[in-house]
Amino acid sequence: MRSIGLFLNRFKNITPPKRFICAEFCDVVKNEMGFKLDDGLIDVRGGVLYISATGPLKHAIYSRRHDLLKELNKRLESVGGDIHEMR
């Protein structure tokens, strides 16, 4: 019979859903920068946040990416999420 520890190991690295991460990032942008970002413009794949917004909007977000990522990761720390890059 297998031990319960082997069974529970598969649940160690559960990450939050993409929709939750997108909603949190939109909230961070709203609080830090003062404008609302549609969560349909954001995609998360492999710990990378992809933004498909217009040029000026994307540039404004990208110029403050370090602060935004730090705040996002602070919010995601309790649920096990980690975003390490923004494109």
Image (spheres, rainbow, N blue to C red):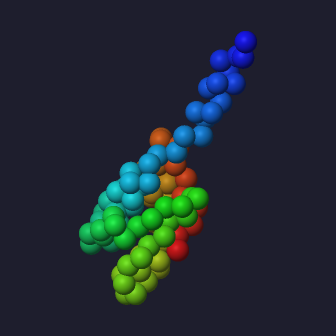
- Residue 29 drawn at (x, y percent): 35, 66
Of the pair 74 and 50, the residue shown nearer to us: 50
Q: Residue furthest top?
A: 1
Residue 8 lies in quadrant: top right
Return the residue found at the far right.
Answer: 1
Q: Is residue 56 above or below residue 81?
A: below
Q: Residue furthest front?
A: 1
Q: Position of residue 43 (x, y in %)?
A: 45, 65
User: As displayed, is residue 3 above or below residue 12?
Assistant: above
At 60% from the left and 40% from the top, the residue drawn is 13
Observer able to see residue 42? yes
The residue sitting at 52% across, 45% down in the picture is 15
Residue at screen point 44% across, 54% down: 18
Q: Residue furthest bottom?
A: 55
Left or right of 10? Residue 1 is right
Left or right: 77, with 56 as reference point:
right
The correct choice, above or below, for 17 with respect to 36 in the image is above
Q: Residue at x 47, y 46 (%)?
A: 16
Image coordinates for residue 23, horizontal then vertical, percent: 34, 57
Vertically, is 63 above or below 73? Answer: below
